[in-house]
Amino acid sequence: MPLNDAKIRNLKSKEKPYKVGDFDGLFILVKVSGAKSWRFKYRIDGKEKLLVIGDYPAISLLQARQARDAARVELAAGGDPSETKQEEKRIRRESRGHTFEKVGAAFLDKQRKEGKSPATLSKTEYHLKLANKDFGRKPISDITSPMVLRCLRKVEAKGNYETAHRLRARIGSIFRYAVASGIAETDPTYALRDALIRPTVTHRAAITDPKALGALMAAIDDFQGQTTTRIGLQLLAILAQRPGELRHARWEEIDIEAAVWSIPAKMMKMRKPHNVPLPDQALVLLAQLRNLTGNGVLLFPSLRSWQRPMSENTLNAALRRMGYSGEEMTAHGFRASFSTLANESGLWNPDAIERALAHVEKNEVRRAYARGEHWDERVRLADWWALELDKYLRDR
């Protein structure tokens, strides 16, 4: 006879556990302690098996019957309800060990093995630190879009809109890595694409007036701080490369005889090797620098450790000490100074200027036909630019 709640409540414990049946294989087991547990008995290939559904009253009679019916449907489809439940338990157990923090660390290790640049690795570490504060210890499969959004809102509340967008993208990369690894099923950041305040795009400040640039070069010449910082700014002005590429430059990349700086692909933004011609003015500065740091690996080591590069803030901080605000000039701005004045001169093929800056042609058709490095012209361009800077310095 089918069970009802009144019957179940009145079932008392005995000296031994006993069963009370419902129907279609469902029964309740009354334990010696008085606890009551739902079970479903079924057969596969003639062998009796048992599915533990859960305890009463946490699982009601109706819920137990629904679980029994679902198990019968699975049996009809050729499945085994007990094995399915064990597999689900195993997955939940494993998922508890796959916290966001651990998956993030595995993602960072993957980036290291892929040879990502130190700047990229540093940014990943920074973003992981922000995210781990909020949900680092949670199983990655339990993290929802609202959880991620709360983390992003904290960054956004400080006015760091660009950082919030980059953080969302980094968290999304980690979730996609988790999905590919079978650890998570979805990327909760996808739903947040339009949830954040869009930052206003601002170009890095740069001086493009020849006289003003000459005044800046004079200020750098007179800089009273670290000699390596002064040389770093002078080389940035002459070579027009990204500050990160210069800060991480190694002596093994410099060929004085050939007058070439060969930057490996892993250090480049576009992950392609890049050769930079060295005009005489750069060679003079490198000779001075070798007397200071030539016994080490890096051209511009940190003052705290010769194994680490100069801080990314050092060069910009030097410009501030000279009286140039962030709205006037940045270390990255020397590239814009070079690009603007070289293009305005009308003397050089724009493609040669773009190659000098290690820019990649966005138009796929043009990129397919513009594979040359314009090397000979770039050597002449580098010499011309170094002489122009000397001229700006004299004519300021």
Image (cartoon, helix red, strand yellow):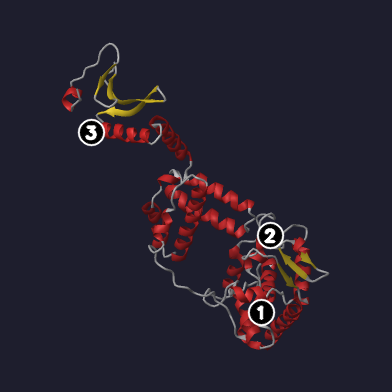
Q: Position of residue 65 (x, y in %)?
A: 26, 32
Give the x, y percent position of residue 106: 56, 47
Q: Return the residue at label 3.
A: 62
Residue 301 numbered mark, or none: 2
> Does 229 appear above or below 340?
above
Image quadrant occupied by the N terminus: top left
Please state the horizontal and vertical placement of residue 393, each as a whole percent of the image.
Answer: 68, 84
Q: Earlier in the sequence, mark 3 or mark 2?
A: 3
Q: From where the camera sits, is residue 127 visible?
A: yes
Q: Residue at x 57, y 56 (%)?
A: 122
Q: Is tag 3's residue or tag 1's residue first in the polypeptide sequence?
A: 3
* Front: mark 3 or 1: 3
Give the secondary structure at mark 1.
helix
Tell me where residue 274 sits by quadrant. Answer: bottom right
Marks 2/1: CA distance? Answer: 33 Å
Residue type at mark 2 is: Pro
Q: Name the image quarter holding the C terminus.
A: bottom right
